[in-house]
Image (tube, rainbow, N blue to C red):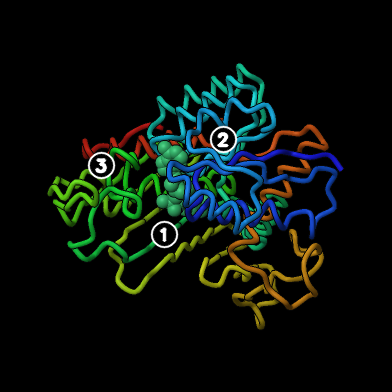
Amino acid sequence: MKTLNIGMIGYGFMGRTHTNGYCQANHFFDLQYKPVLKAVCARNEEKAKAFAQQWGYESVETDWRKLIERDDIDAIDVCTPNNLHKEISIAAAKAGKMILCEKPLAMNTAEGEEMCKAVEDAGVRNMVWYNYRRVPAVTLAKQLIDQGRLGKIFHYRANFLQDWTINADVPQGGAATWRLDAEAAGSGVTGDLLAHCIDTAIWLNGGITDVSAVTETFVKERTHAETGEKKPVKIDDACSFFCHFDNGSLGLFESTRYARGHKALYTLEINGEKASIRWDLHDLHRLEYFDHSDDSVVRGWRSVHVTDGDQPYMGNWWVPGLQIGYEHTFIHQVADFLKSLETGEAIGPTFRDALETQKVCDAVLSSAAERAWKNV
Ligand SMILES: NC(=O)c1ccc[n+]([C@@H]2O[C@H](COP(=O)([O-])OP(=O)(O)OC[C@H]3O[C@@H](n4cnc5c(N)ncnc54)[C@H](O)[C@@H]3O)[C@@H](O)[C@H]2O)c1
């Protein structure tokens, strides 16, 4: 068994999902490489040590630069807020490390381009954690589309709805609410949530050519969690946009953190000439499928329970009928990454793939700011 020594930066939400992926992948997939939890890095040593002990990391670092300098680290996993993705990734590429970076790739396209150049110049393996590609039902959707079962595609529709920032007392900035601080996050729902929808859309339906967007910031000022200062809110609380795809289809996307009652409602629907599909994160193991070629007397939407051994990834899990969940998308991504080390094939989404999503996000934000259609 060959080893892949992981250096993890950040131990928050994603630090946990990825670490779980490293721990589980070899239990369920036949792989020649095995991740080794070499070191976790965070600024607070005590918290980093507690995390290392809980999850089995061999050591801790408090400065990510030191982690990158270490000879015993093969791959750097970037699980920090968005404003650190560029600096860490470029330093890691220069040190010859593989990089697994969280999404969105960067704060903006210019940063993303620098990151792509750095990994490509260094020739290091790179990947971005757009994990929803690896929900078995979404992967199945990709297979059905690639088989031509939908025929010509007319419409792509996606939503990502939450409700956690409606209260104006929620602060911005700091460890828990950096997502509301433009300096740490870059943007609001566009980079945080729509980026997922855009990555999946490009993967399933091809490139996006131009966009027309509207954004809103409902709560204009929030207290900064660290300084206590009331400051203007510079992120987008909500964003909707129309777009054209290269294949001629129309896209309609909406994301907000003000949809009372919705916690993480990521839904997508694709309408083609021959068939339609739809998917919902709250019911993630199901793919809804309507096939117009069915006998008309029984034609209707079917709800495919994606748990059978011949459906994507499911042969590696339990028995047909038993479902898996959110954390498995990260296990799948780790397994695919390790497999790519065996085969030498690129593993998507690469930094370059994620740059396409970044470009769409930038076009969306500038379209909203200028109230004009923007080319991607
Ligand atoms: N793929 C997904 O579905 C998904 C979901 C959530 C978040 N994300 C992305 O993952 C990244 C992290 O988000 P999160 O929800 O895990 O955030 P989080 O706040 O839970 O964790 C961030 C971590 O970064 C650490 N950190 C911050 N500055 C650091 C520094 N200078 N040096 C070392 N560590 C530092 C913090 O200590 C913390 O452990 C973001 O880019 C976010 O957009 C992706």
Please give the residue where the numbered disc 3 appears in the rendered image: 368
Give the residue type at disc 3. Ala
- The outermost residue toward the bottom is 297
Q: From the image, which quarter does the C terminus lie in?
A: top left
Give the residue type at disc 1. Phe
Please give the residue where the numbered disc 1 appears in the rendered image: 160
Q: Are marks 1 and 3 in contact (CB under 8 Å)?
A: no
- The outermost residue toward the front is 46
Q: Are marks 2 and 1 in contact (CB under 8 Å)?
A: no
Please give the residue where the numbered disc 2 appears in the rendered image: 353
Q: Residue at x 57, y 42 (%)?
A: 60
Image position of 114 with respect to 186: above or below: above
Q: Residue at x 72, y 77 (%)?
A: 322
Sequence-earlier tag: 2 or 1: 1
Query: Mark 1 or mark 3: which is in front?
Result: 1
Position of 304 with respect to 165 (left or right) is right
Residues 16 and 349: in front is 16
Local packing at callout 2 (Cα closer than 10 Å; few below 14, some 14-19, many 20+) is some
**Which element carries disc 1, helix, strand or loop?**
strand
Disc 2 to disc 3, how far (Cα)?
24 Å
Q: Residue at x 24, y 48 (%)?
A: 226
Q: Which mark is residue 42?
A: none
Sequence-earlier tag: 1 or 3: 1
Local packing at callout 3 (Cα closer than 10 Å; few below 14, some 14-19, many 20+) is many
Coordinates of residue 296 in the picture (x, y in percent) = 65, 78
Disc 1 to disc 3, how far (Cα)?
18 Å
Residues 127 and 288: in front is 127
Give the residue type at disc 2. Asp
